[in-house]
Amino acid sequence: MKHASIIVRAAWDEEARVWVASSSDIDGLAVEADTMETLEPKILAAISDLLELNEISSDLREIPVHVLSEHLSRVPNPHF
């Protein structure tokens, strides 16, 4: 494995109204869910499957997964 941990980026897709997760650290990861709470277990399950399918090995008993989320919100400008 090229990294000691896996970084997953999750972004809100306003048009589809879902969170979409992907990672450049593990090929094939593409997961979506309605909420971040339901996205995380899907991410972990997919990574577990992809590690096995892609025959990725690591010396670590558990591989850290960092889920970074981004969601744009807006507040009204009171001076506009």
Image (cartoon, rainbow, N blue to C red):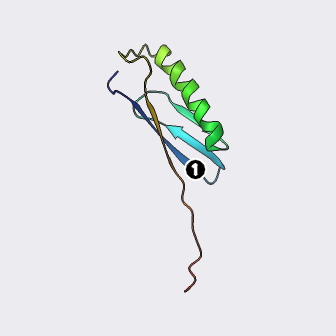
Q: In this picture, is 6 found above or below 71?
A: above
At horizontal 66% and vertical 50% (from top left) the residue drawn is 17
Report which quarter residue 27 is drawn in: top left
Q: Which residue is mark 1?
A: 12
Instruction: Give x and y (percent) for residue 40.
Output: 58, 35
Q: How many marks?
A: 1
Q: In this picture, is 36 found above or below 25?
A: below
At horizontal 49% and vertical 27% (from top left) the residue drawn is 28
Q: In this picture, is 76 found above or below 49?
A: below
Q: Amino acid at mark 1?
A: Trp
At horizontal 49% and vertical 14% (from top left) the residue drawn is 52
Instruction: Give x and y (percent) for residue 60.
Output: 38, 18
Instruction: Give x and y (percent) for residue 70.
Output: 51, 51
Q: Residue furthest front?
A: 61
Report which quarter residue 41 is drawn in: top right
Report which quarter residue 31 is drawn in: top right
Residue 60 left/right relative to 79: left
- In the depicted view, which residue is nearer to us: 9 or 5? 5
Identify the secondary structure beneath mark 1.
Answer: strand
At horizontal 43% and vertical 29% (from top left) the residue drawn is 64
